[in-house]
Image (cartoon, rainbow, N blue to C red):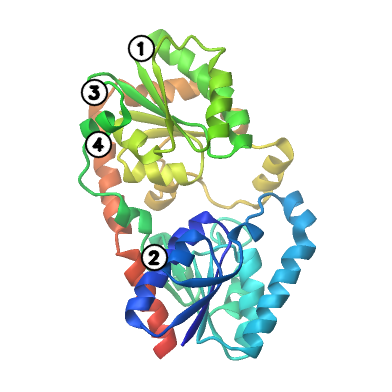
């Protein structure tokens, strides 16, 4: 048996690695091939191209690399048309994977998409593309499955692997000891993004917020996980303009540790909002993009929230400050409400725990079971 998989970025590689391990247990003689990174390759994937070949961010970067990306997709299509696998699994990267899946499905190959495209948020018309391309969508959030069920699109909620990985029982004291931050102080986790562009836009804003917070809470400690050495260096440069006085600890990575340790968080949009939920860290989200991207987004996006806890709950659990609303004074006021109200923090932690439990479905095994149903059905 041969199973084809294509992941387009590290988060997809992480999902694919767990899925391949579970499928290998179900089908010991299965062979796995396609595109993946170190996680998928360690699990047994034969990768025809490096993961980095598809890891292209931004509209203009995609345009610049489009001829190469199309050549890769044509090569994969030709190979799998001539040597049909039992199933094709596209892992995220819908702009690359769905056109490939559609061509393979036309020739009788079963297909699935692991991680739903955000059709529920923008470009809803893409659901037609999904219907033509895949037999089923594997959803990592329950509201996605509910969305598809109302529209007659086959889907399965498999849960989120991060929710399985992060324990339900947590110790802030242990996290503080591991991070090397004071155990008895009020602590804020600051996550200004994992990409340099985000840090350049949000770092100065977040540090202006810190100055306001320190005027009110001079003993407040701050922990900042740095996604890469280059980002750590950039944050150090930005901190040079701030009166730190030994109140800031920089970590190499370890964002979950920082969030578990903290009383509250100030975070960028994206995966950090899910991590804040899983790590029981009541937070405030702020985000800025360039003006042109913001103008386009306003015309296309159809959801009331950006942060994942808010999307899951259908209400504003963590305050959001986007674009022109992202200014220091209101952000600082929202952070102070968490820092100065332990009862509110405890209540939000209970809400987060409930949402965490909803996402725990042993995602790797659940996804493998859904894939097996397609293969054996």
Residue located 79% across and 64% down the image: 67
The mark lying in front, picked from 1 and 3, is: 3
> Mark 4 near mark 1, Cβ–Cβ under 8 Å?
no
How far is mark 4 from mark 1, CA to CA? 22 Å
Q: Which of marks 4 and 3 is in front?
A: 3
Q: Looking at the picture, how far across and down is residue 364, in whole percent?
A: 36, 67
Question: Observer-nearest residue: 220 or 22?
Answer: 22
Label placed on residue 183: 3
> Residues at badges 3 and 2 in contact (C-beta under 8 Å)?
no
Residue assigned mark 1: 217
Q: Position of residue 269 (x, y in %)?
A: 51, 41
From this view, report whether residue 46 is shown above or below residue 253: below
User: CB of mark 4 within 8 Å of CB of mark 3?
Assistant: no
- Nearer the observer: mark 2 or 4; the answer is 2
Mark closest to the chain's N terminus, 4 or 1: 1
Instruction: Give the mark count.
Output: 4
- Give neighbour class at mark 4: few <14, some 14-19, many 20+ (Cα, 10 Å): few
Would you identify the image quadrant in which residue 336 lies?
top left
Task: Identify the residue position indicated by label 2 in the image.
Answer: 18
Query: From the viewer's perspective, is the residue at label 4 or at label 1 nearer?
Result: 1
Q: In which quarter of the image is residue 248?
A: top left
Mark nearer the N terminus (3 vs 2): 2
């Amino acid at each position: 048996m041969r199973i084809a998989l294509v992941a387009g970025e590290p988060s997809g590689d992480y999902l694919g690695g767990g899925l391949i391990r579970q499928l290998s247990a179900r089908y010991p003689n299965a062979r796995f091939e396609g595109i993946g990174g170190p996680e998928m390759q360690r699990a047994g994937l034969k990768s025809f191209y490096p993961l980095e070949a598809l890891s292209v961010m931004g509209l203009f970067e995609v345009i610049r690399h489009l001829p190469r990306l199309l050549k890769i997709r044509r090569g994969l299509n030709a190979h799998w048309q001539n040597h049909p696998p039992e199933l094709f699994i596209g892992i995220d990267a819908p702009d690359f994977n769905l056109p490939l899946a559609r061509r393979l499905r036309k020739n009788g190959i079963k297909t699935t998409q692991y991680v739903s495209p955000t059709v529920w948020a923008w470009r809803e018309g893409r659901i037609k593309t999904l219907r033509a391309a895949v037999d089923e969508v594997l959803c990592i959030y329950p509201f996605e499955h509910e969305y598809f069920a109302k529209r007659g699109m086959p889907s399965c909620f498999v849960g989120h692997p991060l929710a399985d990985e992060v324990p339900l029982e947590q110790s802030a004291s242990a996290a503080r000891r591991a991070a090397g931050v004071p155990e008895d102080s009020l602590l804020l986790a600051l996550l200004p993004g994992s990409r340099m562009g985000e840090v350049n836009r949000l770092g100065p804003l977040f540090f202006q917020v810190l100055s306001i917070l320190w005027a009110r809470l001079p003993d407040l400690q701050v922990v900042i996980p740095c996604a890469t050495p280059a980002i750590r260096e950039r944050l150090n440069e930005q901190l040079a303009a701030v009166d730190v006085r030994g109140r800031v600890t920089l970590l190499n990575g370890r964002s979950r540790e920082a969030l578990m340790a903290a009383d509250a968080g100030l975070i960028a949009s994206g995966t950090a909002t899910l991590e804040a939920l899983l790590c029981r860290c009541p937070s405030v989200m702020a985000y800025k993009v360039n003006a042109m991207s913001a103008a386009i987004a306003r015309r296309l996006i159809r959801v009331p929230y950006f942060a994942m806890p808010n999307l899951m709950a259908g209400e504003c659990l963590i305050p959001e400050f986007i674009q022109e609303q992202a200014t220091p004074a209101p952000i600082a006021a929202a952070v102070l409400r968490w820092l100065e109200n332990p009862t509110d923090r405890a209540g939000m932690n209970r809400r987060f725990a409930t949402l965490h439990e909803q996402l725990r479905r042993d995602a790797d095994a659940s996804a493998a079971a859904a894939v097996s149903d397609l293969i054996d059905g």
